[in-house]
Structures are given as C-alpha cells and as structure tokens.
Image (cartoon, rainbow, N blue to C red):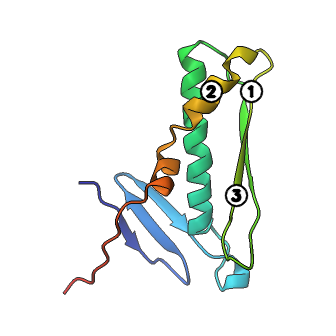
Amino acid sequence: MAEITVDFPKNLQVRAKLDTFELLTDQPPKSGGDGEAPSPFDLFTASMATCMGYFALKFCQSRSIDTAEMRLTMQYEWDSEAKRYPKMNITLHPPPQFPAKYHGAIIKAMDQCAVKKHILQPPEFELSVAS
C-alpha cells in the first residue's frame, strides 16, 4: 500500500512527503496564504497535464520521433457559479516533423492518462481521525 505523509510547515502551507520527494503547497495571498508554492488544485491540474504529456512522450519515443520541440498546453476557466472548472482543453503541439497519420493515435495514447481515469471513475474516499 502506498502512503503519503502530510505536515504543515507554516501559515497555510501543506507539505506532502512521497517516498524521497516533497511537494509543498500554499494558498495565494488573496486566500490568506503566502503564495510561495502552487495550491493543491494547481498540483491537481498540473498532474492532469503532465500525465497526458507523459503518454504523448512515450508514444513518440516508441516511434523514435524527436520531441525536442513538442509541448502540451492545458487551458481551463473557472465557473464562479458552479465553483469548479467545467472543461479542460488540452492541446498537444507536436514537433514539426510529427507525421499527420499519428494525430488520432497520439490522442488515444494521451487518453490513457491515469489521472483522467480516476476522475471518470473516482475512488472511494474513507476519512477518519486517529485516536
């Protein structure tokens, strides 16, 4: 079983420890934080983009396609009424030599993103307080 340990270094900062890595989050000043790190939701959206980027990268590497000029962008707008991001637009900007015949296939590869799969089929959350 995997485990993440979280502590609270200062003000509204929250730090997650995963194996040998640490991820620091903070809130923006408008929310009372110091703005010294991304917010937890920023990490969530970045995990979506980097996960899809990983699958695009692996797709290209398996076909010996140079990825030096490849990039991926994700755009999303806040719906203040619903208090959520209702749509995320992910666009792969392939390198100039990327074969057009692979456009559909690389989209299919990116769609294998485990982060997206967890949104579409969310895990069960069980919350508790230790005694």
Q: Is mark 2 on a helix, strand or loop?
A: helix
Q: Confirm or deny contact between disc 1 and disc 2 (CB under 8 A).
A: yes
Of 3 and 84, nearer the camera is 84
- The amino acid pointed to by label 1 is Pro
The residue to which callout 2 is attached is 106
Q: Which of marks 1 and 3 is in front?
A: 3
Left or right, 9 with respect to 11, comes to: left
Residue that mark 3 sits on = 87
* Separation (CA) of disc 1 from disc 2: 10 Å
Residue 86 seen from this side: yes
On the image, the x and y values in percent for residue 123 come to 37, 60
Q: Is residue 54 above or below residue 127?
A: above
Horizontal side of 128 relative to 54 (left or right) equals left
Q: In which quarter of the image is residue 66?
A: top right
**In the rendering, at what x and y percent does residue 37 appear?**
62, 66
Q: Marks 1 and 2: which is nearer the front?
A: 2
**Percent position of residue 92, x then y:** 72, 35
Q: Is residue 98 visible?
A: no
**Mark 1 surroundings within 10 Å by alpha-carbon count, few (fewer than 14), some (14 through 19), many (20 or more):** many
Q: Quadrant of residue 68?
A: top right
CA–CA distance between discs 3 and 2?
A: 21 Å
Callout 2: few (<14), some (14-19), or many (20+) C-alpha neighbours within 10 Å? some
At which x and y percent is residue 53?
61, 37
Between discs 1 and 2, the one toward the N terminus: 1
Task: Report crowding for label 3: few under 14, some 14 to 19, many 20 or more residues within 10 A (C-alpha).
Answer: few
Where's the C terminus, which quadrant? bottom left
Q: In which quarter of the image is residue 102?
A: top right
**Residue drawn at the location 63% of the way across and 32% of the way down:** 107
